[in-house]
Image (spheres, helix red, strand yellow):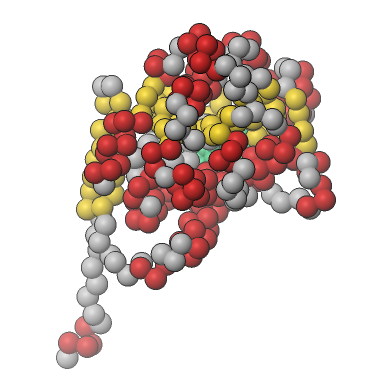
Amino acid sequence: MLPEVRTWLRRRTTRTTDWPVRELAEAKGRTSVSVVLPARDERDTVGHIVGVILDELGGLVDEVVVIDSCSTDDTAAVAARAGAEVHAQDAILPELGPLDGKGEALWKSLAVTSGDIVAFVDADIRGFQSSLVSGLLGPLLTDRSVAYAKGCYDRPLDGAPNGGGRVTELVARPLINLHWPQLAGFVQPLAGEYAGRRSALERVPFLTRYGVELGLLVDLLDLAGLDAFAQVDLGSREHAPQSTEALGNMAAQIMLAAYSRLLRQGKLGRCHDLSSCLDQFRRCAGGHRVVSSDVSIAERPPMLTLR
Ligand SMILES: O=c1ccn([C@@H]2O[C@H](COP(=O)(O)OP(=O)(O)O)[C@@H](O)[C@H]2O)c(=O)[nH]1
Ligand SMILES: O=C(O)[C@@H](COP(=O)(O)O)O[C@H]1O[C@H](CO)[C@@H](O)[C@H](O)[C@H]1O
């Protein structure tokens, strides 16, 4: 891990208990806060999430907006009944023509919200707690030098305390370590819970579908630099896991997102270097331990060329 990333990891990582809601409400002042939930077919969970945010974070959050992302169930009605402002994704900026997926929902949310800070929360979280939001807001409400705060957490899967975040571990983390080592300190680079200053979010493109999280990290790093990022340990987050087939689609979209940024940053030509290390994270008392592995490969010539 780059020394600057280790320093960043120590300096810019906090946890939810560092950000009591009462103190944040005092620090908030005139800063407005929007919470956005992108939701496609999330009727089972979206209402609870909206209700908890409205009930427990009224002094912090000024608006809760659900972007109904072409749901086939009654997600919109459930969200509205819970008190959210609901917008149909394709009804926002219709003159641009519709694009697809989560990134489209998040980009369009900027057009229908007004908060100085915008927090994004997945709508499929099980056992949602308001600290998933208040923790994210902590660094942004108390430090003007922070432009973007990303959550990290344990990823329960199939009853085990960890094991989720499969595309993160198999695709996103290797890509980030290989091509954007400054971002290697993010424990959950694809986490769906993050918050940013509107002044930054409106200056970067949003990749559609599942490319959005990786795209935002790379583009905000370009725009604002690593020290403008913060990371908050939110404990644990359980969501509705997708099938391996569905995650294959997600992985392909994330790889396309990476290639688009490698091309744009002129990095593709330098992919001949086969040496690299991979930094992974293991939960330990008080946070995470970095586990670094040498993943370098080499190449032998065709045997025929030796004869
Ligand atoms: O086309 C889409 C796909 C997903 N989502 C929402 O984005 C969040 C994360 O998506 P998903 O749960 O599919 O991804 P996962 O968390 O399984 O990686 C959830 O609130 C989804 O409802 C969305 O708004 N539009
Ligand atoms: O982190 C991951 O590997 C994926 C899949 O998680 P699981 O293996 O289903 O727990 O989930 C994330 O990735 C998506 C794409 O960036 C985000 O949109 C989701 O919010 C996030 O949960």
Looking at the image, the residue that sits furthest to the left is: 307
Instruction: Say which of 191 and 141 sits in front.
Output: 141
Give x and y (percent) for residue 179: 37, 56
Residue 141's place in the image compared with 201, above or below, is above
Q: Residue at x 65, y 28 (%)?
A: 115
Looking at the image, the residue that sits furthest to the bottom is: 307
Give x and y (percent) for residue 174: 36, 51
Give the left or right position of residue 58, taking residue 192 as reference.
right
Q: What is the count of numbered marks?
A: 0
Give x and y (percent) for residue 227: 38, 38
Q: Residue at x 44, y 16 (%)?
A: 19
Tell me which corner region of the image, top left, top right, bottom left or bottom right, holds residue 128: top right
Give x and y (percent) for residue 96: 78, 52
Instruction: Say which of 247 and 142 sits in front.
Output: 142
Q: Split into 4 quadrants, where in the image is the C terminus?
A: bottom left
Give the left or right position of residue 248, taking residue 159 as reference.
right
Q: Residue at x 56, y 34 (%)?
A: 197
Q: Is residue 181 visible?
A: yes
Give the left or right position of residue 74, taking residue 201 as reference.
right
Residue 210's place in the image compared with 231, above or below, is below
Residue 197's place in the image compared with 20, above or below, is below
Tell me which corner region of the image, top left, top right, bottom left or bottom right, holds residue 267: bottom left
